[in-house]
Amino acid sequence: MAKGSDRVRFIVGGKIFETTTTTLASAGRHSMLGALLDDSWNLRQPAAGVGVGGEYFIDRNPACFAVLLDLLRTGELHVPPKVPERLLYREALFYGLLDHVRAARWGPFDGNLLRPAASVAGRAPGDGTAIRAGPDGGCCVAHGSMVHVYDWMLEEHRPISLDYQQVNDVGYLDTQSIVVTARERLGKGDGGMGLFCSSTGELRHRFRVAHDNQVKSFTAGALSFSSSDHTIFSSCKGRCNEYGIGVWDQNTGQQVDFFYEPPGCLLGDADKLQWLDGSNCLMVATLFPRTDNCFIGLLDFREKSVVWSWSDAGITTSLDEKRVLHAIAMEDGRSICVVNQYEDLGFMDLRSNAGGVRWSSRSRLMNRKLPAEESCYPKLAAHGGQLFSSMNDSISVFCGPEWVLTSSLRRSYGGSICDFSIGGDRLFALHSDENVFDVWETPPSPIIY
């Protein structure tokens, strides 16, 4: 085809289409249509039939092919009312054009430009515990002993069931693999951590904790992952209240290290773990209401030591008004951001062991205390140089060197936000009252001709 005419003819589901090699080239070499331009195409056995005179016969839906061909020509996605979106996504997957559809569906992530795209009703009202965005724009929602998985089309897959074990945390290793941590049932010895297939819910592997050549029963808590050396971190609690951080190899599932809790720390019962690639350290945070005395530390596994730490133990000045509820290491790797019940943002300098929290009243959305009966505490996330914080039923977006409030995301349905997550160029917010989650997307940039 690369040496022939610039015109290409397709017969799709009995309907004739004509296009050019220039249009096909825009599909990319990794797509089925782009591969037609390779000289070796006719030397292989293609998925589509090659007819006489250079015509390509494809036994697929012609209406969807017309939409996808128009997308390649114009860069815009126009879906006629008669074409179901899920059918179009299925056909785009066949042709290898999902990335093109997603790029036309939403633009690069920007918290100040996010718009509500969908609301998905939950399966267990009032019982949602965590939501995690997948790398491909899908997500998973944990509540009780179940994890419901949605692909980027928001189509639900077979759920992951832990048979009455309480889910503590969940996270994506990749688009096909989800790690789930679970609480041990009293006297059952069935807690721990497992790797599941995101599309089928099948258990692929159970992670073990061993010491002195003996496998130990444990409860797994907060999760974190390192992409640089393919490791998994999880807080662990043994039957006799032994605490520590377990480390496993993502590829083999074998335990490669274990960091036992030093005196004065609360590592095993941690609320938050976060791997910092730049410093090769793991941030561990144990926060209110899990403990009265909050602790945040950086663990260096090479030195087997806590190289930086902060705790509010012994701090009495305005403690009730400055209680730390969540923490996140910033993307620059030099500071940790925390939030209190007033949604004041505080910052701690990782380059100094002597500094405390520098609270910023300018980074505030609501000038009122979190209600005593409120069960949803603020959460933090950082993405693309922007900072996000949930409070009640909204999410605040902060930008700039002083982290000034620039926008607010709010939906009226579902009650307070118990968790939110950013990934795949989407923001997912899980509401507590109805266990409904909202999907926020950045609209695509307008095409200027």
Image: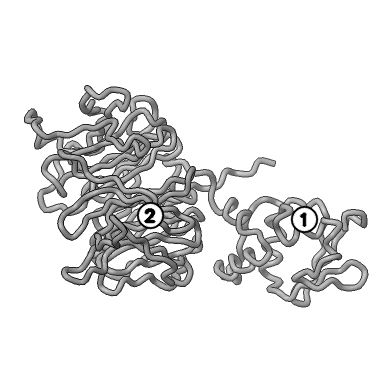
- At a point 80% along the width and 66% down the height, the residue shown is 17
Across and down, in percent, residue 103 comes to 59, 51
Residue under pointer 1 = 24
Against 203, is 444 above or below? above
Frontmost residue, 323 versus 266: 266
Above-or-below relation of 208 to 103: below
In the displayed image of the protein, which residue is found farthest to the left?
A: 316
Secondary structure at numbered mark 1: helix
**Viewer-nearest of labels 1 and 2?**
2
Q: Quadrant of residue 15?
A: bottom right
Name the amino acid, label 1.
Answer: Leu
Left or right of 71, for residue 374: left
- Give residue 282's position: percent from left, percent from top: 34, 40
Residue at 67%, 50% (x, y): give it.
75
Nearest to N terminus: mark 1 or mark 2: 1
Quarter holding the C terminus is top right
Amino acid type of the residue tagged 2 in the rendering: Gln
Query: Residue at (23%, 23%) from the top-left corner?
Result: 355
- How many dots with numbers? 2
Q: CA distance from mark 1 to mark 2?
A: 48 Å
